[in-house]
Amino acid sequence: MEEVGAMTALAVAETKPGRTVIEAIGVSKLFGSSSGPVQALADISFSVGSGEFVTVVGPSGCGKSTLLQILAGLVPASSGTIVLDGQTIDGPRPDKVGVVFQDAWLLPWKTAIENIEFPLALRGVPTAERRARSQALLDLVGLGDSARRYPHELSGGMKQRVAIARGLVQEPSVLLMDEPFAALDEQTRTRMGAELLQIWERSGRTILFITHGLAEAIYLADVVLVMAANPGRIVERIPVTLPRPRTIDMIGSEAFGRLRNHIWHLISDRGPL
Amino acid sequence: MTLARKIAWRLLVTALCLGAWEGAYRLHMLSPIIFGSPSLILKAAATDGVTFLDALRVTLYEILVAISIAWVGGTALGVVAGMLRPLDRIASPFFGAMIAIPFVILYPILIAWLGIGPESKIVFGVLLGMFPIALNTMIGVQSIERGYASMAMAMGASRLQTVTWVMVPLALPAVISGLRLGTSLLIAGVILTEMLAATDGLGFWISYNRSLFNTGQVYLGILLALAVATLANLALGRLERRYGSWRARQQAAS
């Protein structure tokens, strides 16, 4: 019955089909370097509908993490606009965007539940309320019993679950994830992917997930955005038509293999990874 | 019950030790000039107690002034050196060298500049205490990984909140270790310089009575100085456990 509690505490995001939640219009990013300016991102435009699961895949150095930081409002774009939920982004908007990084960055002196409470505590939400909301999210990510454990007592996968719960606790409409499972071993990564899909279905959030794993990108996504480097740009937007709920077995299917080959050629034909 | 028992045991052991010490002195087994005795210390406290309490006040004054300068100066130096990237390459060997220098060889110069009053003790204490604090603070600040700041900003923390809620707690265990080390050196430095050249203070009276073979007075002064050092160490140890226990737990786990 934990799930029911989690569902009620975490008001399901409005899922009017087709409503655009993320809109990137002509986003570019230039970095200064000793050998002149480097174009990290060039004219990136895409949109994500409410409740969609979009993955961004590309070789290292294609600027996918920079794109996520711009979406999160952590780094300003050199030009272009990001519209989230109808509002232009010019700084962090934790009420609209939750972020999960490659490392969990849990505060080591706080317990699991206190880490989830952290964003609420920053805003001065009363203790009882933030405790209840955080516990509901711990239940949602399957760590209901670990509320009082410290980060060093949690495995890598458990830490990332706590980070996911922390990203969701402010009930953002969008969850941005920057290679969240890259540091985990393969078995854990596969399990976490399956669990993330369940969390996504239960919470009704829109998720933008960055990865360099092709199988992961296809397995999770409604839409895969494929990026290329020098300059960082989107080369193709690929809808994934595999049925849901997804199962691990699908990774071996023919349709899956075709998609993977297609993306593989998109990336590798453009130069070294 | 168990606590009362523990205290009773400790008192008993202490009393036995003191009794044995006093007994050995009474039986002329110990030289009173070298070893003193509990009764000699009591006698000293009765005759020169006021002098030593005044001396304690002078010493505490010097220590407290030196602590406030060394803590503020040391942490400020450490934060600046830790945050400004190119600076730490100079700062780290500099702080290291300042810790390695036996400043006591410079004390005659300090006396020439500042006289034999409290000022020279304060400056000497600061010189000894400040650099371990600065070095530890610098290490603490440098050990903060940037990802924590990005996380905090993404979660909606303001710049000030990022510093106070995330950066300071992350650096605090190392800073407090520095404070503990620096403060114990500082206290030793103040009392040492009082012994070398002064007109008042615990160190001065210990040294003065030693030259007169007033062993009771010497021991009384040593006890008071030990009490100051012990109390400071206990207080800072508490602080370390309060704000640094997470680091110890983390290290024990890894």
Image (cartoon, coloured by chain):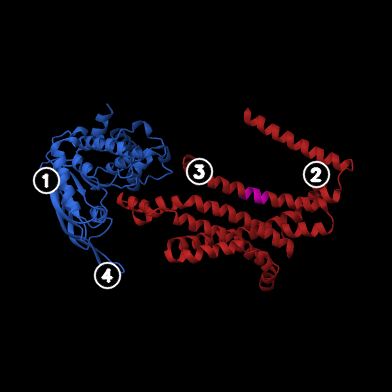
- Disc 4 vs disc 3: Cβ atoms closer than 8 Å? no
The residue carrying mark 3 is B248
Q: Secondary structure at mark 1?
A: loop
Q: Secondary structure at mark 4?
A: loop
Q: Secondary structure at mark 3?
A: helix
Badge nearest the viewer, 4 or 2: 4
Q: Residue reaching furthest left? A: A18
Q: State the CA–CA distance, disc 4 to disc 3.
A: 46 Å
The residue carrying mark 4 is A36
Can marks 3 and 2 be said to lie on one chain?
yes
Local packing at callout 3 (Cα closer than 10 Å; few below 14, some 14-19, many 20+) is: few
- Colour-to-chain, blue: A
| Chain B, chosen colour in render | red
Would residue B228 be counted in the magenta stretch? yes
Q: State the CA–CA distance, disc 1 to disc 4.
A: 41 Å
Identify which residue is drawn at 75% across, 53% down: B221
- Residue sitting nearer the eye, A67 or A218: A218
Badge nearest the viewer, 1 or 4: 4
Task: Give the mark nearer the N terminus: 3 vs 2.
Answer: 2
